Amino acid sequence: MPETLFIADLHLEPKRPITLHHFKEFLANRVQQADALYILGDLFEVWLGDDQDEPTYQAIQTALHNVKCPLFIMHGNRDFLLGTDFAQTTGCQLIKDHHVIDLYGTPTLLMHGDTLCTQDVDYQAFRQQVRHPEWQKQFLAQPLAQRRILAQQARAQSQAKTQSTAEYIMDVTPEAVISALETHGVHQLIHGHTHRPAQHQLTINGQTAYRQVLGDWRDDSAIILSCTPDSCELINLIS
């Protein structure tokens, strides 16, 4: 049966070998039979530029290159510096946030999901800063070693803020979800970022709409969204 796959928030890095193994197995097996694979942000825990030379990241790029089906990758809040060299090496197509596809006849909006968390004002300001082309140009011009130091500092600050921020502030706001669906004229949204996998049903202008939320990947959990012409289902590949 035709199948399109969606994943997000794998946060791959060298110190997570079990998750890396699950991902490579997923690419080598189930993905090879799919119509397409969409990775909706945060494939990596951090991406400091396409000149990263760690063997782990090079192996991941090779595994992605070996995927036979069309491969689409969206920037997340951890890997927004994925660039054209990465796309050429992996054979993927980098897609922008707020990307609409025809999913077996159902117009569907794809997002990473962080822009839906509108109550987190500090994060939204930070996002606007680091997504600016001039900021990225200046950051990437620094030596890789210096970029690593800056990323570690930013991560420490982010972890401290997360611990002191209420959970609801870091989740999506209903108004933002409705606005995104109405703006793009669709009734289905697929996103990640929040690490709260679920399938939500809502009503917009008297019509039923759906919000499919992807889960993050851990040593004991690898959440995918499998969509066929008939339905979409969240699946844990490990359970």
Image (tube, rainbow, N blue to C red):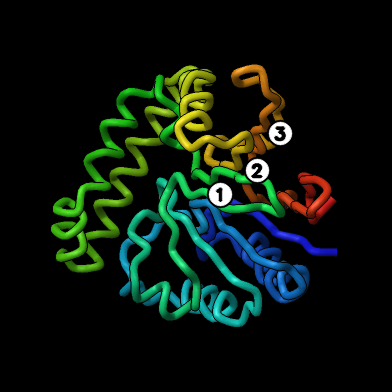
Q: How crowded is mark 2: few (under 14 residues within 10 Å), some or many (20 or more)?
A: many
Residue lying at 69% horizontally and 51% vertically, measured from the top left = 105
Looking at the rendered structure, which numbered label has been put on residue 9?
A: 1
Q: Is mark 3 on a helix, strand or loop?
A: strand
**Sooner in the amino-acid sequence: mark 2 or mark 1:** 1
Q: Is residue 223 left or right of residue 86?
A: right
Residue named by callout 2 = 215
- Using the rendered image of the protein, determine whether residue 121 is visible from the camera's viewpoint: yes
Residue 117 in picture, x, y percent from top left: 45, 27
* Disc 2, SS: loop
200 displayed left or right of 195: right
Who's the residue at 73% across and 71% down the image?
Answer: 25
- Under mark 1, the amino acid is Asp
Q: Distance between the residues labelled 1 and 3?
A: 14 Å
Q: Residue at x 30, y 51 (%)?
A: 151
Q: Name the residue under label 3.
A: 198
Q: Residue at x 86, y 64 (%)?
A: 1
Query: Which badge, 3 or 2, comes first in the chain's sequence?
Result: 3
Q: Is residue 34 above or below residue 62?
A: above
Which residue is nearer to you in this view: 61 or 107?
Answer: 107
